[in-house]
Amino acid sequence: SRQRFSLLLLSGLSSGLDGKWSLFSSDGSVSLPAEVPGCVHSALQQQGHIQDPYFRFNDLSYRWIALNNWTYVTTFNVSAEVRTKQKIHLVFDGVDTVASIWLNGVILGSTDNMFRRYEQSSFSWDWGPSFPTMGLWKGVRLEAFDILFLVFPVCPDSSLSQWAVQVELLVDVVQKINGQITLSIPELDSEQTVETRFLSGKTKNTFILHINTVKLWWPNSHGDQPFYQLSVRGFQDGFLILNTKSKVYFRTVELVQEPVFGSPGLSFYFRINGKPIFLKGSNWIPAHSFQDQISPAVLRNLLQSAADANMNALRVWGGGVYEQDLFYSICDELGIMIWQDFMFACATYPTEDDFIQTVREEVVQQVQRLKSHPSIIIWSGNNENEAALGTNWFSIPAAERPRYVKDYVKLYVNNIREIVQEEDQSRPFLVSSPTNGAESEREGWVAADPYDPHYGDTHFYSYGHDCWDWRSFPRTRFASEYGFQSWPSFSTLQPVSIKEDWSYTSNFSSHRQHHEGGNQQMLQQAALHFNLPNSTDPLSRFTDTLYITQVMQAQCVKTQTEFYRRSQTEIIEGKGHTMGALYWQLNDIWQAPSWSSIEFGGKWKMLHYFAQNFFASVLPVGFEDGDTLLIYAVSDLSQDLKLRVTVYSWTHPDPVCSLKSDPVLVPGGSALAIFKQPVAALLAGCGRCTRLTCLLTFHLEDGGGQRGPTNQHFLCSPKDAQGLQRPNITAEVQQDESGFTVTLHSAAVAAFVWLDVGSVPGRFSSNGFLMVSRNATVSFTAWRPTSVAELSRSLSIRSLADVY
Ligand SMILES: *[C@@H]1O[C@H](CO)[C@@H](O)[C@H](O)[C@H]1NC(C)=O
Ligand SMILES: *[C@@H]1O[C@H](CO)[C@@H](O)[C@H](O)[C@H]1NC(C)=O
Ligand SMILES: *[C@@H]1O[C@H](CO)[C@@H](O)[C@H](O)[C@H]1NC(C)=O
Ligand SMILES: *[C@@H]1O[C@H](CO)[C@@H](O)[C@H](O)[C@H]1NC(C)=O
Ligand SMILES: *[C@@H]1O[C@H](CO)[C@@H](O)[C@H](O)[C@H]1NC(C)=O
Ligand SMILES: *[C@@H]1O[C@H](CO)[C@@H](O)[C@H](O)[C@H]1NC(C)=O
């Protein structure tokens, strides 16, 4: 079981053993052909032995698969040429998980670590089913060689004036050899040759290429992501024995934890290329229970959706998998920064020698494989295990606590941290998330309160509080997890359900909800501000309810994220300088209610459309403090901005009045109050408006016109609004050279206008919006060929007043 960056076998041969294998269950009941890479569930499904495991209650019906033992068998010929080589390796890139490997009746070894590792997300979390997978989930091949080179370009080291590319060469030779290694980046006219000697056996050799001026890699929306081709060549007696090219990117990353003026505690933010950057994004979970079923197109679509929603960061959460190389390559290209957890989550882990040994091997392999990616900006030891000890989730008796803390320190600090710091000095390491960072270290690595908002990052969930009230959110330095659930759309549920499942209280709806009380919590939260759907038609009532959960989620996460973004510059009561907002969670593993903003299959929920706005580079944020309305200008760019506020009544899509502020210089990377007025004074200056009859929209402008999205502020809960009526929206789909457009016509102000084209894959330019004009046009980007006729037929339109 081995991970690697690039393998070079100029003097060797590599024959893939992927493809068709045979698969047997140990009880003799099933035997079938199976694809490698793959897993038992996928093979059974592909051969028609089982249905879609995601259909209805199949996660229960198919438990027998994981309770059985399975054997993969293949036969291969070894050519005469292969036999001439001095060394032959049989390489398994990923074995899931506990297995023995036999060749011609001889046991070669056994495995017990999928990454190398035991626990995985496969045993079900609150957002996913339980499908403990088994199989050869990555490739298998035979490598025969006299000399083996593994090349690891390391992300360049940090100094903005003098750059150095470091290349690690792991060499495996039978006899020592003398040779030359040449490193070059032709585009920069940089080249360096060193005479070297590789000793017999396996050795690690490090080479450095110095460079002066480079173009830098920047996070999404802060600049481009240029790369260079690094060439590494090796010669022995004038013969080329190694020749490889790899991409290198240049950037620096620092995690800054230093005293904050006017606040106890320490800052916690990332500086990329010397510039403080607010991390905007989400948390990533495995995109499928069966890793072999994630196509490159699915991966690219999800990551592109993150970038399109103005995200610049994702956290690869520690209960899933280390993602495949392609994942990180796409993030490099898109400028998505990755907070990479090691795969330890919400549990205590053993510290026996054999476990520590396999973990050490896992960490070395993963760090070597991934460290050339500029997108990865931090390694983090585990998910929530410091918090679990700090706040005693597992009810550990006080007398036993020291032993648990000692084990924690042994695994994450003395082993994982030590290896990472040895293998990769180019990026910071954190022991846990959430953590108090430097303060946790001072307290012996497990802080008394790992959620302290004065230090490090926090995770925060609260379903009982009214999410429209920003006072319930912690003014943290960095919000690395927070969120609210919603249901996916009907078109996503339909293929895995039948008619009797289509109600909010069906067995199916309960079975798909893996978070205790989740379905009720969503309705309770929604009912604080919206009337719950009450259609007499059962199917409408179900689909309206799915919609209202998405409205609730989008509005809740918007409020919380805007709170974090506007807290970027201020210190209030000792708290603030928030520099990150990563909501839980980006994507889904199956068709079920969860915290995701993208449904299984790639469809954007309302939240994802909202994210596009609340993560925009320039954003106005409105909120009330006491009875005063404040509007902040939040900007990643430095600009003179002025604000325009427009007041509407719920009854007419025509402005009642509007006001404009003077221009204010908003420095890049700051959030400034740009407008402040008591609500009563604002309304008094605006005809017969009251809190119940009117609402506000606002946007920022500079000399060139509007900058950033138009935002809105409700002066009451929409369920109390006077004058909100069914808008009777009509729509027309058209196609021109640039694609499909939908032109809407509305008879009234319409809130949370939601366009849905069922199972036609693609996304709208905007959705879930407030319509305060009679007409609006949105475009639709289709992810497969479609037509005006198909879109017109599939299109449905809902707004708030339509569901009750
Ligand atoms: C699977 O193999 C293990 C170890 O040999 C054995 O204990 C177990 O009974 C087997 N299970 C089945 C269903 O054959
Ligand atoms: C191995 O070689 C033999 C003889 O050429 C051939 O009959 C057989 O099909 C080969 N097996 C595989 C798995 O390629
Ligand atoms: C729901 O599940 C329960 C318990 O398994 C069963 O008794 C009941 O008949 C099911 N209801 C429906 C509508 O299928
Ligand atoms: C929408 O249509 C209904 C039913 O025809 C009508 O009662 C209502 O007034 C219409 N709404 C508006 C805003 O015109
Ligand atoms: C709005 O749409 C209606 C119906 O499509 C059209 O008749 C009208 O001219 C449009 N109004 C504006 C201002 O574009
Ligand atoms: C549904 O709820 C709305 C808002 O509370 C109410 O006005 C309406 O009468 C209800 N309709 C039914 C059919 O219960």
Image: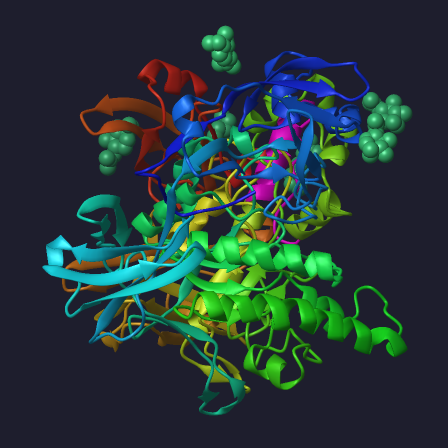
Q: Is residue 266 visible?
A: yes
Q: Residue furthest bottom?
A: 262
- The percent position of residue 173, horizontal first and vertical second, equals 40, 49
**Quadrant holding the C terminus:** top right
Is 91 within the magenta? Answer: no
Q: Is residue 291 above or below residue 790?
A: below
Instruction: Determine the residue positioned at 57% across, 18% down.
Output: 75
User: Horizontally, is 13 left or right of 248 in the view?
Assistant: right
- The percent position of residue 219, horizontal first and vertical second, equals 32, 59
Q: Is residue 549 above or below residue 648?
A: above
Bounds of the magenta segment: 528-550
Instruction: Determine the residue positioned at 82% across, 19% down.
Output: 27
- The percent position of residue 144, horizontal first and vertical second, equals 43, 35
- The percent position of residue 769, horizontal first and vertical second, equals 42, 44
**Quadrant holding the N terminus:** top right
Given residues 378 and 179, the one toward you in this image is: 179
Question: Where is residue 468, by image quadrant?
Answer: bottom right
Is 533 within the magenta? Answer: yes
